[in-house]
Amino acid sequence: MTYIRIKGGKRICGEVTLQGSKNAVLPMIAASILIRGVTVIENCPDITDVREMLMQLQQTGARYTFYDHVLVIDCSEVFLYDGEKKEASKTRGSVLFLGAFLGRFSEARISYPGGCVIGSRPIDLHCELLRSLGVTISEQEDALYACGRPAGAELFLRSPSVGATENAILAAVCAKGRTVLHGAATEPEVSELCSFLVEAGAKISGIGTNILAIDGVESLHEVCHLLTGDRIVAGTFLCAAMVTGGQITIHGTKGVSLTGFDRTLRRVGLYCEQKENCILATGIGKLFPVDLLVTAPYPGFPTDMQSLLMAVLALADGESRLCETVFESRFKIVPELNLMGAAIEVRDRMAVIHGVPVLTGATVMAKELRGGAALLLAGLAAMGETRVYGCENIARGYEAICERLCSLGAEIDQMEEA
Ligand code: EPZ
């Protein structure tokens, strides 16, 4: 069995290059189905969520090459495919094939993506928007069948779901007529998907706002897109500098938005300067608690940064409270951090973190992606050795994380248990 071993207590210092954004590239992979030709995505991260999505895409007859972070997809010849249940549930991005298939074939069949550790992950909002576009959707036991060419309409999203917004966009870009989506999610990944589609010939206005106007076009053309860096991975490295009192430069950050969390990190204990294409960051060596922090859709504090901040606040000088409002079960990391000497209590949607002076290395389990990354942070700061099992969950969204942290001076490597 594989685990990550960390000998804590080292300040991380040096320079690191940021990977491309997982949550921006997954919808673009789905969107490539709309392009009857070649899609090129540069700076694509080599992570398992991307690899799994490409395996599903290949089942449609699409062909791709992926070398040195350049992904080339050819969807000239694709056909309808019903994703295998086991594959679909692994990668949340697979639900986005729904909108893309409808945009190309006016029909779609996907296996129900199912829930995961952080929540039940329903897709009722996706279905509501697609039905408003005139699509008929029947939900079978573990699969969804949709048919009908999307027709432009006024859509109202009652909760700013990122995935539902992206599915509606993918279904609407080649629909008959104009679609106006009110209440759209405004995460940077949604805006980048829109920019990618406009580069391919789509007509979208209001990008970056919660009202998107999409005028359907006959077809999209070939595109080459340079993917923006991953803002949550950038935040992860910033938290690593905070918990070790280190000093780092993160390259490849042009266009990366730290909105929603940079001010909090500065308040807790980070000096941070964002330049044109890099971020200079220094952990100030002392960590301050936050009285109350509530996660929220963009531009609020991102839910994906919640576990990472929790690992930092575990070492703050005082009591902090984190309220998770986006997902119903995103505190799975708490028992693992407490095994390392943290003092965290969970009361429904609230985590109360009593800062402690030190953490101690232990054997812990990464149960999901961001919680797993947070355990790496705790291991970097802890005294002694930490072993993190379940590291396949971390590889879903972090490319070569051990190598990158090692290059910054951390004592970390991936081990195979005999
Ligand atoms: C995207 O998930 C991201 N994943 C998540 O990142 C991120 O945490 C989330 O957006 C919020 O920012 C990808 O982009 C691949 P939502 P998504 O639809 O689209 C509820 C990571 O760590 N909801 O905005 O699935 C849902 O249950 C991952 O990189 C419905 O009730 O998130 C959740 O409570 C984790 N019905 C809330 O809305 C629906 O039809 C937000 O979900 C859809 C969602």
Image (tube, rainbow, N blue to C red):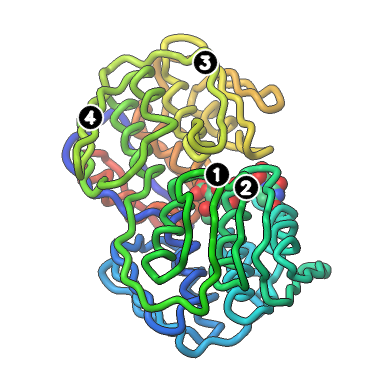
Q: Mark 3 and mark 1: span between their CA atoms? A: 32 Å
Question: Label 3 amino acid?
Answer: Ser
Q: Nearer the viewer, mark 2 or mark 4?
A: 2
Query: Whole-Å distance between the Cαs marked 2 and 1?
Result: 6 Å
Residue drawn at (39%, 13%) of the image: 288
- Looking at this view, name the residue that lies furthest to the top: 318
In primary-sequence order, the first of circles 3 and 2 is: 2
* Residue 320 image label: 3
Residue 273 disc label: 4
Q: Give whichever of 66, 231 is nearer the camera.
A: 231
Whichever of labels 2 and 4 marks the residue nearer the N terminus, that label is 2
Label 4 amino acid?
Glu
Can residue 142 be seen in the rendering of this structure?
yes
Q: What residue type is labelled 2?
A: His
| Quadrant of the snapshot with the C terminus | bottom left
Residue 347 on image: x %, y %: 69, 22
- Where is residue 330 drawn, in percent x and y? 61, 37
